[in-house]
Image (tube, rainbow, N blue to C red):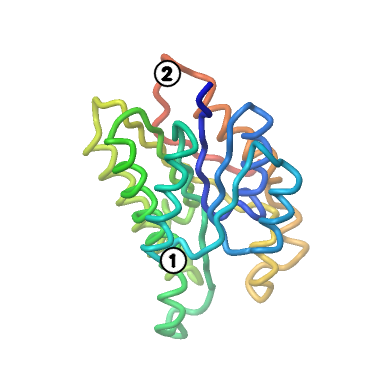
Amino acid sequence: MEKNILIITGGSSGLGLELVEQAINRGLYVCNLARNEEKMKELEALFKENYKGFIGDIADEEFVINAIQEIAKIGNIAYLINNAEKACFKEPSQYTKADIEMSLTGLKGMILCSTQTLKVKNETDLKIVNIMSSAALKGNKQEALYCAAKWGERGYTESLKVAYKGSSVKIIGVYPGGMNTEFWEHNRDYVTLEKSNSFMPPKEVATVILDNIMKYSKVKVADIIIERN
């Protein structure tokens, strides 16, 4: 029986890791594109025949092309979840060119992974799930660059919806608020440990996402907004 595959980017920590584990528990074969080599090897040892890791940079076109082509040989690609991101939070006058390049990694990867997956699927029978942030819906003082990247991802997502309206390619935008993940460990000058501990647990957010993209065959889910209580 052909495997149904879920591709995810950035699935070695945080929300991405929760999505990997829950998707496998729901019977999917998961292919994970991420950079953390140590964690990826741990996941391959843990999940064995239900998982394959591809170690590389999702903003690298050659890496993405080779990975997606190899994945297409494994089985049927049913889902692509664009989850990977990088970010920095500063006052608007403090951003550098390096900050800009880093912050656009998620957008570049989203476009590259979506493009290549659509090609190998012949633009049919695919769900593309773009995980963004509530920062794609509003502006925040110290998040100018983060919001710029997320608004770009939102624009790309909305354009894909128009391009594939009425087809068997379904596009879903996901807009979660703050989650208690390792993401904030690199941004403690912006969000304290105490504050991040009050954020949403990624396990619950992952469940909401997978419930909405997998459970319903006759219902179209276009956007998922997940907010803290």
User: Judging from the image, what secondary structure is the residue with disc 1 in?
Assistant: helix
Specify the quadrant that holds the C terminus.
top right
Q: Which residue is mark 2?
A: 219
Left or right: where 8 falls relative to 151: right
Q: Quadrant of residue 138?
A: bottom left
Between residues 118 and 166, which one lies in front from this camera angle?
A: 118
Q: Which residue is mark 1?
A: 105
Residue at point 65% right, 34% down? 24
Q: Earlier in the sequence, mark 2 or mark 1?
A: 1
State the image coordinates of residue 210 (x, y, percent, origin top left). 57, 32
Residue at point 45% right, 69% down? 103
Between residues 140 and 189, which one lies in front from this camera angle?
A: 189
Mark 2 burial class by Cα count in 10 Å: few <14, some 14-19, many 20+: few
Which amino acid, by three-letter code, is at mark 2? Answer: Val
Which amino acid, by three-letter code, is at mark 1? Answer: Thr
Left or right: where 122 falls relative to 186: left
- From this view, report whether residue 168 is shown above or below residue 133: above
Left or right: where 197 falls relative to 106: right
- From this view, report whether residue 40 is shown above or below residue 157: below
In this view, which residue lies farthest toward the left?
Answer: 163
